[in-house]
Image (tube, rainbow, N blue to C red):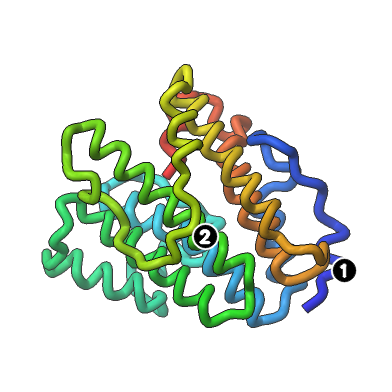
Amino acid sequence: MKYFRLLAMVPPLPGAPDAPPISLGELTELYDADMAEGDRALAATLLGFLDCRNVEARLQGYDVFDERAPLTAEAIEEKAELPEYLEEFLAAHESGSISDPFPYDALWRAYFTHLVEVAESSRSVFLREWASFEITLRDALARQRAEGLGEKGDMRISGVPVDEGESHAGLLSTLAEAANPMERERLLDASRLAKIESISGIDPFSTDAALSYLAAILILDRWDVGKAADVTKMLEVFA
């Protein structure tokens, strides 16, 4: 699909992690109004990241809920019309059958497995490459943290099968030199934004261009200090 009107309306993205030029809520309203049904489903898969954050917060007893997520609080509470991966995770959580030492690793493994499956079944080159990049980056970070704690390097990796892709060795080395946790997160998100730009495609009005813009806004949303000026609270939104 071509989204001339939609993508001509959105403001340009910043070149580094910063407050988003359009709010995530405004963007999702535009996408809901203008995108074709199949492409809205791809966008909803990216936004499923927010659903998983809401599910984890609910199960841990936190009184927070991101209303911009595709699923409502009622749908999660009543387990109504949930994606299959969430239904299966919640059933396993309730039955106590999750074997992971940290049970929410199973939630995120289910989400990223779903993301890969949707990416592979779609024609979106962006979605496939973004899923591979994000999963391998998260696994590299998990491995680095585990080794830093003297644990087995593969103890907390996702286990989601993707192409080997980038090693992220250079980025991990740079992170070790970061002055503080905020700077570390800024380096990580700068790398994510650079990757998104590099795989968004040559057509600025394509489905992939729309998905890449949404993926970038999801990252920039975490730097909206207007809604979370307290640094401690801001760090809590980084997954």
For label 1, the crowd category at 10 Å Cα-Cα, with few meaning under 14, some 14 to 19 and many 20 or more, is few
Q: Residue at x 80, y 63 (%)?
A: 202
Q: Position of residue 120 (x, y in %)?
A: 51, 77
User: Which residue lies under the disc numbered 1?
Assistant: 4
What's the mark number on residue 69?
2
Q: Position of residue 66 (x, y in %)?
A: 49, 52
Q: Residue at x 19, y 69 (%)?
A: 92
Q: Is residue 4 left or right of residue 188?
A: right
Residue pushed farthest top? Answer: 179
Q: Is residue 12 left or right of residue 123?
A: right
Viewer-nearest of discs 1 and 2:
1
Question: Of helix, strand and loop, which one carries label 2?
Answer: loop
Disc 1 versus disc 2: distance between alpha carbons?
A: 25 Å
Q: Residue at x 31, y 74 (%)?
A: 87
Question: Of helix, strand and loop, which one carries label 1?
Answer: helix
- Residue 43 placement: quadrant: bottom right
For label 2, the crowd category at 10 Å Cα-Cα, with few meaning under 14, some 14 to 19 and many 20 or more, is many
What's the mark number on residue 169?
none
Q: Is residue 8 left or right of residue 39?
A: right
Between 199 and 100, the one lying in front of the other is 199
Say above or below: 103 vs 169. below
- Residue 224 placement: quadrant: top right
Say above or below: 223 vs 7. above
Quarter of the C terminus within the rendering:
top left
Kind of residue indicated by mark 2: Ala
Q: Position of residue 218 (x, y in %)?
A: 59, 50
Between 150 and 19, the one lying in front of the other is 150
Say above or below: 162 vs 228. below
Q: Earlier in the sequence, mark 1 or mark 2?
A: 1
